[in-house]
Image (tube, grey):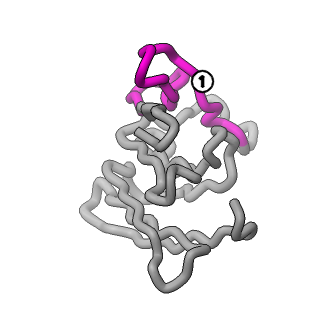
Amino acid sequence: MNCFGEVLTASWRKNEPLQIWDFETANLKTSIDWNFKENTENIKASTQLYCCKYSKDLGKLIFAGGSQVNSVKIFNWEGKGVATIDKLSHACVALDSSNDFSTKNHQLLAIGGGEGAIRMFRIKYNNPNF
């Protein structure tokens, strides 16, 4: 849950796998468009999600990943796509984020792969007031 009382869910399904729900009413607020930046050959093969998470900086970012296309995508708090980490060798089965305490403009992201590998990324905000 983020600071606005919204619950983020990921589903291992082809249609609308990433959704935001209102905790208080249990109503669906929005389905996030997973294929925000796909080329035509990948549009038919959608990632089926295993995991999702709000970033630990009041939920400014949303992270989600899974299998089929084996990718992780990053969205802003409104659900607009901002980045893709794709062509992973195996499915993303777990992910976690943390604030980078060396600077306020970074978020750390760990991706756990189906092959037992862990990948670490530092995500820098282009807009420090984001």
The stretch drawn in magenta includes residue 32? yes
Q: Quadrant of residue 106?
A: bottom right
At which x and y percent is residue 98?
41, 66
Residue type at mark 1 is Thr
Q: Is residue 76 left or right of residue 91?
A: right
Expressed as whole percent of the image width and height from the top left, the position of residue 8 reads: 45, 34
Residue lying furthest left: 116
Magenta stretch, main secondary structure, is loop
For the C terminus, the quadrant is bottom right
Q: Is residue 83 above or below residue 51?
A: below
Q: Nearer the viewer, residue 122 or 45?
A: 122
Residue appearing at x 57%, y 21% in the figure: 29
Question: Can residue 42 be seen by looking at this rendering?
Answer: no
Q: Circle 1 sits in a helix, a strand or a loop, which is it?
A: strand
Find the residue positioned furthest to the bottom: 102
Packing grade of label 1 (10 A; few <14, some 14-19, many >=20) is some
Magenta span covers which residues? 10-36
